[in-house]
């Protein structure tokens, strides 16, 4: 496995579960538990890659594609986003973008297969309206944006961040 694929696995293990959707309330592992496991296996083939992956791992990604998107954005020099953080857009309106840049008022959503369901489309439109009404720009990414090292996704997010006032260093 590549370091990025190991990072996807680590993010999954660290992910905070959503009890409304799954039968657990605790992550599969904590960062400390994963670090301890790696320490116990010094010298094992692949351990260096696993350590590098763990350095890249973050709590908060809800899917493999969200992790891949985050890594592509960071490799392209964009700032590290907040991951699935509840954000109050207006009094009583809280949304949780997959990746968020509150300073620039940019939210990024990875739209997987589940977003083609009719009811989900209605919810996605309402979500986008909530962000727009709060002055946020919501960037929607699909699998077609993820080809070629997510180049199209990077362009879309970079453009939104620049519109929000971000400047590359």
Image (cartoon, rainbow, N blue to C red):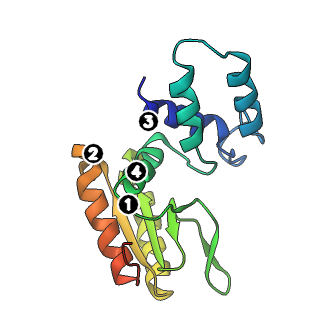
Look at discs 1 and 3 and give the one toward the viewer. 1
Q: For the residues marked 1 and 4, what is the alpha-carbon distance in whole angstroms?
A: 13 Å
| Callout 1: SS | loop
Look at discs 1 and 4 and give the one toward the viewer. 1
Q: For the residues marked 4 and 2, what is the alpha-carbon distance in whole angstroms?
A: 9 Å
Judge left or right: residue 91 versus residue 5. Answer: right
Sequence-first disc among 1 and 3: 3
| Callout 3: SS | helix
Q: For the residues marked 3 and 2, what is the alpha-carbon distance in whole angstroms?
A: 12 Å
Query: Is residue 117 visible in the rendered structure shown here?
Result: no
Residue linked to disc 4: 69
Q: Nearer the viewer, residue 169 or 118?
A: 169
Percent position of residue 76, x then y: 34, 56
Furthest residue to the top?
Answer: 44
Residue linked to disc 3: 4
Characterize the local packing of mark 2: few (<14), some (14-19) or many (20 or more) Cα atoms within 10 angstroms. some
- Write the residue at 34% across / 58% down: 141
Quarter-of-image position of residue 39: top right
> Does residue 141 lie above or below 54 as drawn?
below
Residue linked to disc 2: 149
Sequence-first disc among 4 and 2: 4
- Write the residue at 26% across / 64% down: 155
Sequence-first disc among 3 and 2: 3
Quadrant where the N terminus is found in the figure = top left
Residue linked to disc 1: 77
Query: Is residue 34 visible in the rendered structure shown here?
Result: yes
Q: For the residues marked 1 and 3, what is the alpha-carbon distance in whole angstroms?
A: 16 Å
Sequence-first disc among 1 and 4: 4
> Does residue 18 lie above or below 120 as drawn?
above
Q: For the residues marked 4 and 3, what is the alpha-carbon distance in whole angstroms?
A: 11 Å
């Amino acid at each position: 496995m590549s370091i990025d694929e190991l990072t996807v696995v680590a993010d999954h293990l660290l992910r905070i579960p959503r009890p409304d959707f799954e039968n657990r309330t605790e992550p599969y592992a904590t960062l400390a538990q994963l670090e301890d496991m790696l320490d116990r296996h010094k010298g094992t083939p692949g351990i260096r890659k696993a350590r590098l992956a763990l350095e890249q791992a973050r709590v908060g990604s809800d899917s493999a594609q969200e992790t891949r998107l985050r890594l592509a954005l960071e490799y392209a020099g964009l700032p590290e986003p907040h991951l699935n953080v509840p954000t109050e857009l207006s009094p009583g309106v809280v949304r949780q973008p997959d990746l968020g840049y509150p300073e620039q008022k940019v939210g990024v959503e990875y739209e997987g297969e589940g977003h083609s369901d009719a009811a989900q489309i209605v919810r996605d439109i309402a979500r986008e309206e909530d962000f727009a009404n709060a002055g946020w720009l919501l960037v929607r990414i699909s699998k077609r944006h993820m080809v070629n090292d997510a180049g199209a996704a990077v362009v879309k997010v970079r453009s939104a961040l620049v519109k929000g006032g971000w400047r590359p260093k």
